[in-house]
Amino acid sequence: MNRRSGEESRKNILNAARRVFSKYGYKGASMRMIAKCADISLGGLYVYFRSKEDLYSTLIVRSLESLLKETKETLHNIADPAEAIRILLSRRVQYARRHRELILAMGKEQGFSFCNKERKKFYAEQRRLVEEIVRKGIASGTFRECSAQEVAKIIVCTLRGFILSMIVEPDAMFSPDDCSALLLEGLLRKGVRCGENGKTGVQTSLEKAMG
């Protein structure tokens, strides 16, 4: 077996596994079902993946790597930092919706601790990507002076909240365009003040986060 055909076989198996896990969940899926979907023998499947957990872990890691690569490639030639934030949010939400069934199965049965190390690495990379965009926005005068690190945390946590809402409250899923507008423009009209010392709790929190 040459390297190219081996990689193609792995991709075929992972695509089949995505379909099976999405339909039956982790507990309901079996290696036999995945082998049938991939049109490969059960023994052939075990040549590439030693267990269902191994296959599931690989699927999650590959998905995260694919999403990060897709995001970086999409943003590569976007000069406007505000547009880059909008596109990042939109693509992230679109990706989550495209793989909604797999995310549901993963969250309900395996929990978000599964592949925790890989997830942490993914979110750290995503934060660094957002930080870079924000810093460029500050340098160009598009964004006001703020803590790029804290803003990146807010944006990435907002996206994680979207994923969680898919599991616990599907009706609460938000529009990426509305999310972008809120993050980039804020909720209060210019000059409006309310609450103690003329500031809202939300405004005060954001000011602390954004320096």
Image (cartoon, grey):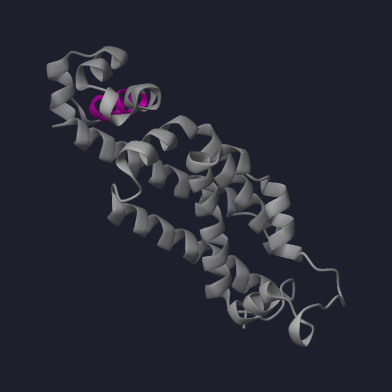
Residue 19 appears at what percent x and percent y?
39, 23
**Quick check: is 61 in the magenta stretch?**
no
- Of all residues, the one furthest to the front in this rendering is 196
Residue 101 appears at what percent x and percent y?
45, 30
The answer to whether 107 appears left or right of 97 in the picture is left
The answer to whether 72 appears left or right of 54 in the picture is right
Foreground of the two, 4 or 138: 138
Which corner quadrant of the image does residue 8 belong to? top left
Foreground of the two, 33 or 199: 199
Residue 80 visible at all: no
Q: How many marks?
A: 0
The answer to whether 135 appears left or right of 42 in the picture is right
Report the residue at 39% width, 41% height from top.
107
Residue 34 visible at all: yes
**Quick check: is 6 in the magenta stretch?**
yes
Which corner quadrant of the image does residue 130 belong to? bottom right
Report the residue at 20% width, 30% height from top.
52
Quadrant placement of the N terminus: top left
Report the residue at 47% width, 59% height from top.
126
Residue 122 appears at what percent x and percent y?
39, 55
What range is drawn magenta here? 4-15
The relative height of residue 102 versus residue 202 in the rendered view (above or below) is above
Main secondary structure of the magenta stretch: helix
Report the residue at 26% width, 28% height from top.
27
Residue 33 appears at what percent x and percent y?
26, 16
The answer to whether 23 appears left or right of 116 in the picture is right
Quadrant placement of the C terminus: bottom right
